[in-house]
Image: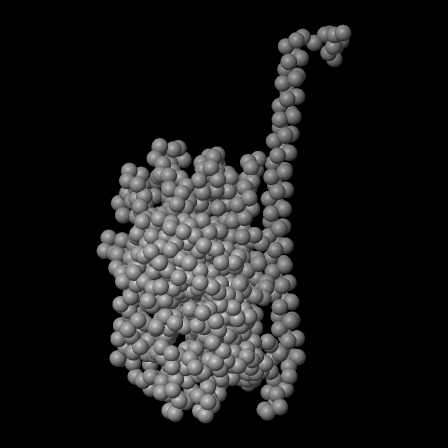
């Protein structure tokens, strides 16, 4: 059948083809039009989403204001002065784990005319209300102490017994005969005859933090661990430390002038109820109390002086990431916190001591991993994280947000890293191992490099010559040219050091790398990477100073044992024991080291060759403490199963034969000490007991008064007459985790749940003993120990995984009449 035209004549094959071509063009035009309309609809959806978010923010702010007004109207009148007192719970909530925080949710404030209407701008209660709030908190605090039975120690001079109360439980401590007549537990005591100075910090936080290693013009590498920022000159083997922070540092940014540094921290140990404090902040935000809250510190890397403290009462939970502006010389600072909505705030940081917040807005309901300013557009900010990359434009006090559009490309679960070229193009790396280029001013993908890494891209570095270096979870560092074409230069990081978390430029062609296993490496594409700093990666508990060398051993839940040299500041050797380590001790001659694990197993190995001689099993609970007698003939093994196992040592400390076990504790054993003559043991337990034992017979000594004059070879038990003064008023028995007496100095060091190391005179037998306090750790201090010649003290943090080495020096400059002080 033939098709005819309008005049009835049949159509030729050529005219039919032309008609089909015209129809195809019409369809193609319709498709283009449809795609444009879909793109416009997507854009409108994103804009409406932003508008909805802004409306929700405004509504949340209104509701918060209404709640504040209602709360102010519901006041209780105090009986004394009749002043109004807000009904707030002022009780402090303390947690052993600095990561666990009960912080109230806060809706982000909206921004109007360039200024945010945050809670800090709400009119606060009058001074009378604040005064009564303080009184209420004090009263409830005393009520709490009374309920737990924590009160001053009571002394019975007739029996020579001091009764110490911990959580309502009385503990009888017998006063030595020589002190019975003159002893008074409340007598004022002098300051300790020695003080500490932080000399070296072992460790780095790379396991869960990003963009936190930089090389400074001074040649120092700057990074952080726990609450310390370390400035490490590798060539000169010198460290300096910025100690302004009070808790975990989570992020770091270097100013374009390479001299100023901004660091952000989490909430401090003593402040948990963020919302209550927001409504009633102290008059001086820069006071020590205010510094317990999450905030940002801007400080001088040369003098280590703090210049500005910003964000107090404005930041929730923690500061997640920071960045200085680049196009204008660093006049602005952007911060993202770890609130549920990950609030982003922009600061004129140099205006006054506390800076000036230009605006604040919700950033993302999902985790934010990085933030940065464009180096060419002063008003452009880029954020990335879980399920998103966002492009922000800051104009006239407002932030306009555009979500990155992946179009038909696979959308990653995480955008893990960003960097910006000198031309303003954004390069992002994601959890799929891909690299994407986003052109300046746009929010759509311009170019994509698939499978740049086998796994997430953790770091992107754009160097001055335009080359690009990336580091991934696959352990590789790859070099690319300007067009993201491989140059062929690749570095493979040994598995023992972890994956490159951050890659930054060092001196010349050197690269400085921070890894996921808390190591800092240095090297080039030509010369292999070498570690300049190593650290533990999980909770750290075991510490054993060498009995005759300037060395000490640490071990933790990462299954690794490290032997450190305090003079060279390096690792002598490391060994993976295959189990979580809980405790450790050297033999008397220093040739053997014993490591106890959480499974009840303990290992005997050579302290030089690491050869494993034997392993033993005592129960199935963690081996809490290991102690060798002063004569080197016995080993005491304190277990979490409430027992103490006694072993006889022979064959040059290589053979261990069990004698028996000491049974009597109703809770797990925490600390042990041998007597100087190796006949007796004293031990503490989890229920605040102090028991004494005949070690040879493995029997408890019930008549504890007979032990009042025994000389002890060490003093690591925290509940003894000699350590009465280390317990602060209201302590619950778990606040102080560890203590150690110096070998030949009359000083005693302790580590507590608040990250503090304290120095006391020894014995610390008066309840209000004076002390010196030192910060640096951000987690519970799990162990302290003096080097054999008492020249240095070593302290270990639990979850902060930091090891700190302190120089011990004489303390003749302090007056004996001054009260306890803090040395930061």
Q: Residue 433's x, y, as percent?
A: 48, 39
Q: Quadrant of the C terminus?
A: bottom left
* Residue 780, x across and y down, in percent: 45, 66
In the image, what residue occupies the spot 48% across and 87% down? Answer: 154
Q: Is residue 308 above or below residue 492?
A: below
Q: Quadrant of residue 677?
A: bottom left
Give coordinates of residue 705: x percent, y percent. Answer: 45, 83
Q: Nearer the viewer, residue 99 or 77?
A: 99
Name the residue rendered at 45%, 92% in the picture: 158
Q: Residue at x 56, y 73 (%)?
A: 276
Q: Residue placed at 38% from the left, 87% from the top?
A: 177
* Quadrant showing the N terminus: top right
Residue 565 in view of the camera: yes
Query: Between residues 816 and 118, which one lies in front from this camera angle?
Result: 816
Evaluate whether residue 290 shows in this view.
no
Above or below for 534 versus 729? above
Horizontally, residue 611 falls left or right of residue 166, namely: left
Is 456 drawn above or below residue 18 in the view shown?
below
Q: State the scheme by which the image is colored.
A: one colour
Q: Nearer the viewer, residue 89 or 130?
A: 89
| Frontmost residue, 76 versus 802 | 802
Q: Position of residue 195 (x, y in %)?
A: 30, 74
Location of residue 309 by image quarter: bottom left
- 622 horizontally vs 201: left or right: right
Total marks shown come to: 0
């Amino acid at each position: 059948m033939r098709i005819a035209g309008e005049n009835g004549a049949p159509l030729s094959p050529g005219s039919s083809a032309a008609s089909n071509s015209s129809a195809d063009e019409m369809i193609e035009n319709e498709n283009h039009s449809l795609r444009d309309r879909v793109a416009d609809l997507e854009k409108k959806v994103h804009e409406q989403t932003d508008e909805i978010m802004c409306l929700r923010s405004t509504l949340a702010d209104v509701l918060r204001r209404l709640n504040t007004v209602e709360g102010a109207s519901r006041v209780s009148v105090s009986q004394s002065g009749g002043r109004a007192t807000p009904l707030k719970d002022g009780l402090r909530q303390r947690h052993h784990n600095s990561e666990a925080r009960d912080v109230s949710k806060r809706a982000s404030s909206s921004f109007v005319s360039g200024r945010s209407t945050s809670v800090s701008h709400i009119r606060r209660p009058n001074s009378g209300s604040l005064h009564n709030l303080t009184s209420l908190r004090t009263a409830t605090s005393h009520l709490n102490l009374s309920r737990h039975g924590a009160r001053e120690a009571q002394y019975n001079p007739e029996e020579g017994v001091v009764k110490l109360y911990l959580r309502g439980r009385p503990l009888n401590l017998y006063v030595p005969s020589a002190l019975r007549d003159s002893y008074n537990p409340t007598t004022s005591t002098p300051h300790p005859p020695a003080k500490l100075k932080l000399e070296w910090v072992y460790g780095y936080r790379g396991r869960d933090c990003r963009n936190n290693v930089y090389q400074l013009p001074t040649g120092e590498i700057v990074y952080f661990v726990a609450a310390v920022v370390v400035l490490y000159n590798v060539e000169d083997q010198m460290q300096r430390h910025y100690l302004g922070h009070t808790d975990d540092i989570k992020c770091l940014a270097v100013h374009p002038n390479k001299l100023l540094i901004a660091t952000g921290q989490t909430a401090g140990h003593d402040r948990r109820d963020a919302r209550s404090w927001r409504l009633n902040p102290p008059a001086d935000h820069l006071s020590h109390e205010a510094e317990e809250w999450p905030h940002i510190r801007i400080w001088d890397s040369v003098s280590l002086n703090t210049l500005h403290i910003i964000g107090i009462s404005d930041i929730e939970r923690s500061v997640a990431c920071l960045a200085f502006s680049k196009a204008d010389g660093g006049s602005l600072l952007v911060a993202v916190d770890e609130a549920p909505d990950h609030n982003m705030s922009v600061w004129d940081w140099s205006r006054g001591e506390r800076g000036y917040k230009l605006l604040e807005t919700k950033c993302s309901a999902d985790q934010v991993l990085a933030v940065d300013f464009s180096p060419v557009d002063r008003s452009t900010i880029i954020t990335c994280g879980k399920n998103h990359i966002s492009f922000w434009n800051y104009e006239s006090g407002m932030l306009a947000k555009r979500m990155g559009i992946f179009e038909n490309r696979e959308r990653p679960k995480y955008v893990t890293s960003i960097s910006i070229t000198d031309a303003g193009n954004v390069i992002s790396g994601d959890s799929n191992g891909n690299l994407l280029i986003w052109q300046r001013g746009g929010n759509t993908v311009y170019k994509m490099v698939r499978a740049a890494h086998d796994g997430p891209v953790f770091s992107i570095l754009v160097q001055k010559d335009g080359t690009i270096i990336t580091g991934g979870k696959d352990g590789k560092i790859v070099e690319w040219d300007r067009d993201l074409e491989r140059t062929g230069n690749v570095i493979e990081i040994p598995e023992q050091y972890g994956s490159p978390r951050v890659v930054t430029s060092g001196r010349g062609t050197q690269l400085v790398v921070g890894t996921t296993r808390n190591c800092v490496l240095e090297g080039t594409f030509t010369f292999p990477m070498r570690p300049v700093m190593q650290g533990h990666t999980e909770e750290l508990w075991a510490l054993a100073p060498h009995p005759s060398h300037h060395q000490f051993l640490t071990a933790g839940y990462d299954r690794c044992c490290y032997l450190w040299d305090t003079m060279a500041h390096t690792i002598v050797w490391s060994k993976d024991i295959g189990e979580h380590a809980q405790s450790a001790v050297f033999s008397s001659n220093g040739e053997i080291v014993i490591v106890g694990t959480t499974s009840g197993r303990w290992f005997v190995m050579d302290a030089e060759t690491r050869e494993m001689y034997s392993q033993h099993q005592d129960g199935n609970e963690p081996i809490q403490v290991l102690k060798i007698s002063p004569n080197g003939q016995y080993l005491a093994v304190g277990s979490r199963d409430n027992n103490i196992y006694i072993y006889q040592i022979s064959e040059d400390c290589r053979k261990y034969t069990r004698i028996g076990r000491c049974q009597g504790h109703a809770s797990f054993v925490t600390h042990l000490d041998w007597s100087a003559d190796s006949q007796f043991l004293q031990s503490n337990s989890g229920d605040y007991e102090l028991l004494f034992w005949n070690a040879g017979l493995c029997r408890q000594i019930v008549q504890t008064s007979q032990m009042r004059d025994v000389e002890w070879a060490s003093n690591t038990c925290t509940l003894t007459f000699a350590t009465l003064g280390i317990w602060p008023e209201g302590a619950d028995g778990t606040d102080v985790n560890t203590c150690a007496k110096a070998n030949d100095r009359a000083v005693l060091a302790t580590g507590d749940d608040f990250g503090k190391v304290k120095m006391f005179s020894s014995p610390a037998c008066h309840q209000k003993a004076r002390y010196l306090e030192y910060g640096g750790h951000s987690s519970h201090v799990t162990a302290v120990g003096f080097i054999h010649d008492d020249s240095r003290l070593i302290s270990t943090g639990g979850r902060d995984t930091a090891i700190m080495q302190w120089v011990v020096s004489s303390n003749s400059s302090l007056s004996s009449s001054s009260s306890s002080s803090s040395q930061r």
